[in-house]
Amino acid sequence: MGNMIKAIEHAFWLGTEQCSYLIHINKAGKPVCAYFGAKVPLTEDISAFLEKDGPSNGRRVIYDKEKDPNCSLDDIAAEFSLPHKGDQHNPSLLLENSDSFVFDFVYESYEIKEAGPVEGLPSPRGGEELVLILRDQRMEAELDLHYLVYEEGVIGRYVEIKSSKKILCRKAMSYQLVLPNENFILESSYGNWAGEFQKDEAKLTHMGYFFGSNTFASGDNHNPLFFLKSGDSSAEHGSVYGFNLIYSGSHREEVEVNSFSRVRVSAGLSPQHFAWEIDKGKPFVTPVAILAYSDKGMNGVTAIFHSFIRGRVIPEAHRQDLRPVLYNNWEGTYMKFNEGKILSLARKAKKLGIELFVLDDGWFGHRDADNSSLGDYTVYKKKLPGGISGLSKKIHKMGMLFGLWFEPEAVSVDSDLYRAHPDWAISDGIHPNSEGRNQLLLNLTKPEVRDYLFEHLHRIISEAKLDFIKWDQNRPLSDIPGGEGGFVHRYILGLYELLSRVREAHPDLWMENCASGGGRNDLGMFSYFDTGWVSDDTDSFERASIQANMIKGYPACVMSNHVAAKTSHQLLRKTSLGTKFDVASIGVLGYELNLNDLDPIDKKELAAQIETYKKYRAAAQFGEVHVLAEKEDGRIIVSSIKDGQALASYCNVLQTPHPAMEKLPLAGFEAGKTYEFSVRPEKYDPRRFGSLINMILPFHVKEEGKLVNVVSRHYAMDAEKFSGTMDGEALNAGALTLGPQWAGTGLGENVRVLGDFGARLYLFDAK
Ligand code: DGJ
């Protein structure tokens, strides 16, 4: 075993190259956080780290006068908290039995060992573990605080509650952490369908912050990823703490500042859906949470999370494999397809250099719209007379991998499955069921439902020799039945069991996570899935912003980004295919538009994009990511660098007639190394310039007239040129000066016509 955990008298050090964490057992036997921050020497003498005794604060409950006349549980940096013994702030645990609401756990012993899996829940691979065992003898209950330490700089935490008498748990957070306030800014995300990962920031005040999801899924409303940034931190500098949960169900995050400027942070299961009976032989375990600290700003925490997730969370089999470039027919055809159309799309995809063809929703039962057939695993013969196996064979013969869409957790009322087993749908059995996207959810707490789903998934994956599945989930939960408490958590445990079986049976299958886009992109799901569809919003500007926020906590290799049709189906905003690619290129590239409708000039563009992507794919999917500018800065810039290659994706917000002189902020390049840089060759559709085009043509064309329409199918104008060499240190210093943006006059060869929401991709190669 390594030496990341060190037990000293009444205290424990957790240490990595990036951070140190000191837990002290105070005089009252309560574990407190004496330090969590930048790496420090793990000294035996920790007295200088500890809070000094002082007078107790006026109106306080003193926990135990004999042990410590000054200790009120309200004031200490407690590593967990329960109410009713003087702690007035948000508890991390709520327990009760028929006799009392008071549970008073006191430190008893510890254990240090190799970290093992957490039963029934996804947990990271490897690591070292410290368990602090606490007991309330009077209640015959035990509380184990688990600390997992990973060399990437991540501290994992979860709690386990055991009891030899029946108790009820009403709130279970995976951790509590108390930090001195460094003028923290809380950064989290909010959102909804087609608008996930919208950045939210708040300077902490004493009002307290609560967010999370009560949808039953980790949700597009508030992802469990959040950060506390010290007031003077920036993208590359200063103290930032990052937090996430390895969990896919309803969750809650709480941040509270007390009047002594202590910040209490916790996260775990949403109490709204939660009540759990604990009894002899029936312990309860919370999901694992992860915590990280960096003194290198937000991008420092991002780097820690990325290497940790790539190494220990995502499935082992494809952990380091380059993700294939895929085509998905959803926005190209929706459910209006037949085998002929699919094969013609596949042939075109192959010609462009695409490696994986994915058939989306609409291939089963009699599904022509979203109101039928979910739950039925028979092919829709009218559309696909040769079946899925037949289609798969043909696509394989073209030299591509083949993938298929499923929505295993759902059932349509108009389905054979629902007609045979109406009791398999989630329902309280009293009220009529409420539908979401015209469907119900299957009750995954029932083993027979999971068996049914596993059998059919396993059969189709094996028979059709699928290389990839997209696992979708398209509605929140409603109509929860009574009976055993914690239905939502049981559902998620059922889901994890089903996913484990699919994964065990098909370790090499590529699996993509989806929940109406990013409705369940969390570390629980990424423990089983290689990638996740980021959002149903394929508008490039929206995506640039969503991706820039998601990538702060999730590595590029899990983020599935597609180039869609020029006119966004969600916003009806028009952007070029070039811009769409420039935004999609940091992550896992895919295409989702009707390839049969491409003009000759578009085909050339797409083929060139795929060629560029393949050349830089390792950096695009596995590079060190830096988010260098965000929407509020008037441009979104994200870079990714690996082994001497780098990409920087630049997306403009709004064009102005007075564009600023721009330098390209960059980071992560090697000092002393020379890099060749260039902009990916971009093209302008002549129609872009409207009637202004007449200023350079020897003849006259009408804006959007027939002639210009025909010409633009075959011809596009070259955009600006930009290339040269620069030292890594100068690139990191942000010295690379960009060409001017179009400002109404003169289209010189350096001038960038970005317009509103236009993008560029800058490419770098070490010489
Ligand atoms: C929602 C997904 O996000 C889409 O990509 C697509 O798969 C549809 N569901 C299909 O119903």
Image (cartoon, rainbow, N blue to C red):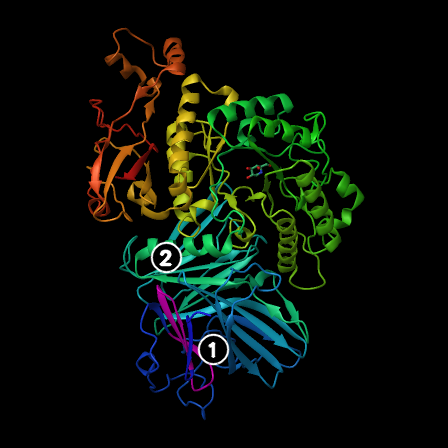
Please give the residue where the numbered disc 1 appears in the rendered image: 87
Q: Position of residue 665 (x, y in %)?
A: 25, 44
Q: Quadrant of ligand 1?
A: top right
Q: Give the amino acid type for the residue marked by disc 2 in the picture.
A: Val
Main SS of residues in magenta: strand
| Depicted 758 relative to depicted 26: above or below | above
The answer to whether the residue bearing label 1 lies less than 8 angstroms from the nearest atom of ligand 1 is: no
Q: Nearer the viewer, mark 1 or mark 2?
A: 2
Please give the residue where the numbered disc 2 appears in the rendered image: 301
Which segment did they paint magenta? 11-34
**Label 1 packing within 10 angstroms: few (<14), some (14-19), many (20+):** many
In the rendered view, does 664 fall on the left or right side of 651? left
Q: Is residue 518 visible?
A: no
In the rendered view, does 482 fall on the left or right side of 355? right
Indicate the quadrant where residue 170 lies.
bottom right
The residue positioned 32% from the left and 41% from the top of the image is: 646
Task: Tell me the SS state at disc 2.
Answer: helix
Q: Nearer the viewer, residue 316 or 489?
A: 316
Residue 35 falls inside the magenta stretch:
no
Q: Give the amino acid type for the residue marked by disc 1 in the picture.
A: Asp
Q: Which residue is outermost to the right?
A: 420
Q: Which residue is outermost to the bottom?
A: 66
The residue positioned 51% from the left and 79% from the top of the image is: 110
**Label 2 packing within 10 angstroms: few (<14), some (14-19), many (20+):** many
Q: Is residue 665 visible?
A: yes
Q: Nearer the viewer, residue 543 or 435?
A: 543
Q: Position of residue 735 (x, y in %)?
A: 19, 43
Task: Tell me the SS state at disc 1.
Answer: loop
Q: Position of residue 354 (x, y in %)?
A: 49, 30
In the rendered view, does 724 fall on the left or right side of 593? left
